Image (tube, rainbow, N blue to C red):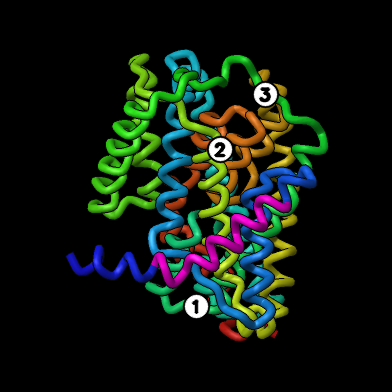
Amino acid sequence: MKPIVDTAPDIVRNLPTVALAVLGGWLFSLVGVPLPWFFGSLFLVAGTNLAGRPMRGPRGARQIGQIFIGATIGLYFTPVVAAIVAAHLPWMILVAILSIALGGVGAIILWRVARVDSATAFFGNVPGGMAEMLAQGDRYGAQPVPLTISQLTRVTIVILSIPPALTFFGETGDEIFIPFAETVDYGGLVLLLTCCVASSLALYRVRLPNCWMLGACTFASLLTVFELSLSAMPRELLSAAQVFIGIALGERFERSAMTSAPRVILGSAITTILMMAVALVLAVIIADETDIVATAMIAATAPGGLAEMSLTAAVLNLGVPLVAAYHIIRIIMITLFTLPAYRIIARLFLDREDNPA
C-alpha cells in the first residue's frame, strides 16, 4: 500500500508541472504547431528547467502516456494490416542491423569529439530505448551525465526535425491504415484500458524493454486481429499522451548538465545527422519497393524513440502500425545484439586508446 500512499502527494506536488505542460500544449495548438500538445509541454517544461527552476512530472505519467499510445497503435492491427507488417519484416531487420552499425560509427565519432570512454560513446549513440541504453551503459561503467545528454540530444534533434518536416510535406495517410474500432464506447474503453494495463504489468514483471507501450499494444492488437472491438480511443487521450511524453522528455533537460558538456552535444548532433541521412535514403528505397508512402517510411526508419515516432505517426496518420513495428523490431534486435556489438567495436576501435587526442 505504501506506493499508493506515496503517489497521491506526488501527484499533488507535481500538478504545477502538468498545468504548465497543458498550457504549453494549448498555446501551441492555437498556432497550428505539429504535435502541439507534445511540443508545447516539452518546450515549456524544458525551458523552465533550463531557466533554473527544476520541474518534474507525477510518478507514472510517462507510463500512462505509453499505455495510451500502445492501445491506439494496437487498434490499427487488422488482419490486412498485420499481413502488410509481416511482409515488411526483412526490411525491419535490415533497418535494425544498420541502426546498430551506425551506433558503432557514431560511437567512434563521439569518442573522438567528446573524449568520453568507450561505454559512454557506444551506449550514448545506439538508437534503442533511452532507459534501456542508460541501464546497459551503467552496467559497463559509462559516465551517466554524458550518456544521458548524448541520448537526449539524439531524440531531441529527431523530434524537432522529423514531425515538422513531415507536416510541411503534407500529412499522407492511407485508407488501409485506419483503426478497426471507430466509435468510442466508454464502458468498453474502461475495459480496454484495464486489460492494457494488466498486459503491461505482466511484461513489466519479466523486465521487457518498453513494457508499458508493448503490453498495451499487444492486447489491443490481439483484439483487432481477431476483429473484436471494445472501443475506439478518444483523441483526447492521445493528446494527454502527448502531454505526458512531453513532460517526461522535458524534465530531463537539467541546466547544470546541459551547460557542462558542449562537446558531447556536438558529437551527438553529428552522429544523429548522419543517422537521419541514412534513414532518409532507406525510407525512400523501401517506399519505392513496397508502395508505402515515403512519409510513413521516414517515420519508421528515423532514429527516434518508439513512443515519440509512434506518436508522430498516430497524430499525422502515417501508417501507425507499420511505423511502430519498425521501431519495435529495432528495439528487440538492439536488446539482443547491442552487447556483442559493443564488445567488438570497443575491442577493435575504442579500447586501443582510452583517452583519444
- Mark 1: secondary structure: helix
Image: 31 above or below 53: above
Indicate the amino acid at tag 2.
Answer: Leu
Mark sitting earlier along the chain (3/1): 1
Asked if the residue under mark 2 is in contact with the one under mark 3, i.e. CB atoms within 8 Å, the reply is no
- In which quadrant of the rendered view does residue 7 lie? bottom left
Position in image of residue 154 (x %, y %): 64, 60
Q: Which residue is mark 2?
A: 94
Residue found at the far left of this picture = 1
Mark sitting earlier along the chain (3/2): 2
Q: CA distance from mark 3 to mark 1?
A: 40 Å
User: Quadrant of the image for the C terminus?
Assistant: bottom right
Q: CA distance from mark 3 to mark 2?
A: 24 Å
Mark 3, mark 2: which one is toward the viewer? 3
For residue 222, say whether it is visible. yes
Taking the spot 24% from the left edge, 67% from the top edge, the residue there is: 5
Q: Which residue is mark 1?
A: 144
Q: Is disc 2 surrounded by few (<14), some (14 to 19) or many (20+) residues within 10 Å? A: few
Using the image, tell me which numbered label, if any, was put on residue 173. Answer: 3
Mark 1, mark 2: which one is toward the viewer? 1
Q: Choose between 323 and 267: the one closer to the eye.
A: 323
Q: Taken as a whole, is the magenta stretch helix, strand or loop?
A: helix
Indicate the amino acid at tag 3.
Answer: Gly
Taking the spot 74% from the left edge, 38% from the top edge, the residue there is: 281
Indicate the amino acid at tag 1.
Answer: Pro
Read off the magenta span.
Answer: 11-27
Image: 317 above or below 131: above
Image: 236 above or below 53: above
Taking the spot 48% from the left edge, 58% from the top edge, the residue there is: 341
> Is 16 contained in the magenta span?
yes
Asked if the residue under mark 1 is in contact with the one under mark 3, i.e. CB atoms within 8 Å, the reply is no
Mark sitting earlier along the chain (1/2): 2
